[in-house]
Image: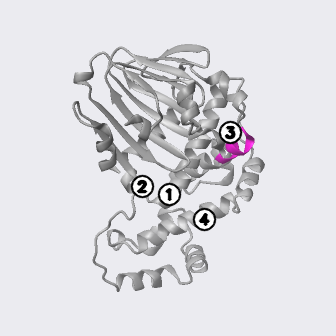
Amino acid sequence: MTATALISTTVVADDIDDFAAVVELLDLGRVQLSKISYPPLRAERSSRHIRRSDPGWFYLTVPTGGPLAINHADRQCTVGPGQFAMVDTSLPGVVANRRPVQQLIIHVLRSDLPLRHAQMRPGLARAFPLGGGLGALLVGTAAQIMESADQYSPHDARALAQVLVDLLVSVLAQFDAGVGAASDAQHRLLHLKALDFIEKHLADPGLTPEGVAAAQSVSLRYLQMLFREQGSTIAGLIRQRRLERCRRELREDTFRRRSVAAIGARWGFGDATAFSRAFKQAFGTPPGEYRQRKCARTVNGSARIANPLPHKLVHHRPGKDPTQDLRSSQ
């Protein structure tokens, strides 16, 4: 089962008559996420396994229950809850646990990381603390994506994968001085953090480009350069996102009793005339007329998720061919 869903290894367990394992796998294309639970075992990936099948994955594994011993890249470590370790599937290694283990694994194609092999090797098979920084952000983001997989469409997969790759590159740079991150990955991460800050503060009338830059601890000029590279400006994006929020509330029944001016003020447009002018320029009609048109229509229907991301849940029960479970789950 793991050879098909993850990578091929030789697995040895003391009690094969009472062996129950679960693999939950989410495929984002460039990145895969998996949650695995299994009893005590020893899994070895040898040079023979690698010659036979080498997908070239770079693993970041996070035990959420039970310690895990790793012997890999001429180094040994024990990693437990609150920590993470990294593994290169193109190198031999052994993973073993004496107690039941649950773990989250982030699989990234090594060829998609803007780092040379020699740069990544110093970080392999080391127990790093998650802490409250980028490591925790990476793991929390991956866990949230897995929990809400049915809310995303295949179109979202590329963006989600890029977010995880950028976070992983930044984590590699943070936890090992021998690992250097490419500047473009750092730029993308800074841009994402600035976007997140803007989204969370859109309702604040005091939100300004200067405030966004200060929150990221960078100069306004530097952040403006990053936004220009993405084909936008900070002020332009703030204005656009505020107008989009206003448009959404103007067409929703929940806000029908709220005046047009109040909706504009709620999203940072203190001047009703300026709001009406900006809205018409963006959407081709004044906000009051837009609301009348939308409210004149009656739309009945139910929301559904179209084409959810592939999400495989695999169970192995004693006495049953595990590949049947895998085939049926796909």
Q: Label 1: how many residues lie within 10 Å, few (<14), some (14-19) or many (20+)?
A: few
Q: Position of residue 111 (x, y in %)?
A: 65, 42
Give the left or right position of residue 100, taking residue 26 as reference.
left
Quote the CA–CA distance across marks 4 and 2: 32 Å
In which quadrant of the rendered view does residue 5 lie?
top left
For mark 2, what is the residue?
309
Query: CB atoms at circles 3 and 1 under 8 Å apart?
Result: no
Residue 186 falls within the magenta-colored stretch: yes
Dot placed on the residue nearer the N-terminal end, 2 or 1: 1
Q: Nearer the viewer, mark 1 or mark 4?
A: 1
Q: Nearer the viewer, mark 2 or mark 1?
A: 2
Q: Quadrant of the image for the N terminus? A: top left
For residue 217, which numbered disc appears in the image? Answer: 3
Give the left or right position of residue 192, taking residue 101 as reference.
right
Vertical arrangement, residue 275 with respect to residue 147, above or below: below
Vertical arrangement, residue 310 with respect to residue 249, above or below: above
Query: CB atoms at circles 2 and 1 under 8 Å apart?
Result: yes
Residue in the picture at 66% in, 25% down: 121
Q: Is residue 133 visible?
A: no
Q: Secondary structure at mark 3?
A: loop
Extent of the magenta region: 182-188
| Foreground of the two, 131 or 326 | 326
For mark 1, what is the residue?
156
Q: Nearer the viewer, mark 2 or mark 3?
A: 2
Query: CB atoms at circles 4 and 2 under 8 Å apart?
Result: no
